[in-house]
Image (tube, rainbow, N blue to C red):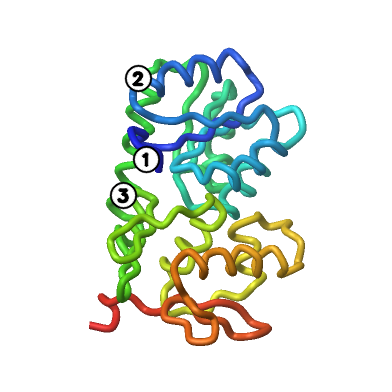
Amino acid sequence: MEVGIKYKILSIDEEKEVQYFLKRMFLKEGYKLFTAQSGRDGIAQLTNSCPDLVLLDVVLPDADGIEMVRKVRDFTDCPLIVVSSRGKEKDKVTALDAGADDYVTKPFGPEELMARIRCALRYRRKYGNKNVFQAKDLKVDFERRMVLLHGDQVHLTPVEYRMVEYLAMNSGKMITYQKMLEKIWGPYAAEDNKILRVNMTNIRRKIGDNPAEPKYIFTESGVGYRMVESAESTA
């Protein structure tokens, strides 16, 4: 997480006026806004920005809005708020059943939207899997989105961080290559494991984990990866 940035928000909305309004509003709150104006760009931004929360308009030029809700939910479990001009009860129920956490109808008041966002982020912090993973000298701070080794920050790319985060949240469990690909790159990711191997090589180099004698991330050839169990689990 960048210094001074509280949260990263991704807005998938084709209306430039809305994006401009959100950018000004979030700047005052110390939030960083990433934008996409189509479903395709929105999925790409999910990988690049690793947002803490997604705002999604179900009216997009290249994608069905409800299908986009499902795609986002398949890709990440971060809070997802639909922001749309469609205000019928049926629209709201369909979006919520598809995986949205909340639904705000356009036009919206800035105070109401910020309240909904704070509520969603607060709920995530309170009921998320855990706040910190720690094993030996490795620590993953999920709230601050940081990885530390011997107390020093390890500088990972967004993709590398998501891989470490996902393994740490499921420490002790074997995560298959395909499951990892789908989680990080989306449900339609190619089945080629090369991209996983390249990123894992970089991760291991940065955390000083020798694949021949791993301390943190173990590989079962042909199957997947497993993060060592946390100190809390083995205590």
| Residue ID for mark 3 | 125
Name the amino acid type tagged 3.
Arg
The reply to whether residue 129 is in sight is: no
Q: Give the class, few, some or many, for how many residues have Cα within 10 Å of label 3's Cα (few <14, many ≥20).
A: some
Percent of width and height locating residue 116: 37, 31
The secondary structure type at the circle numbered 3 is helix
Instruction: Locate the C terminus and report the quarter of the image it occupies.
Output: bottom left
Q: Give the class, few, some or many, for how many residues have Cα within 10 Å of label 2's Cα (few <14, many ≥20).
A: few
| Residue ID for mark 1 | 120
Name the amino acid type tagged 2.
Lys
Q: Are marks 2 and 1 in contact (CB under 8 Å)?
A: no
Percent of width and height locating residue 110: 39, 17
Residue 82 horizontal side relative to residue 41, left or right:
left
The secondary structure type at the circle numbered 2 is helix
Q: Earlier in the sequence, mark 1 or mark 3?
A: 1
Q: Are marks 1 and 3 in contact (CB under 8 Å)?
A: no
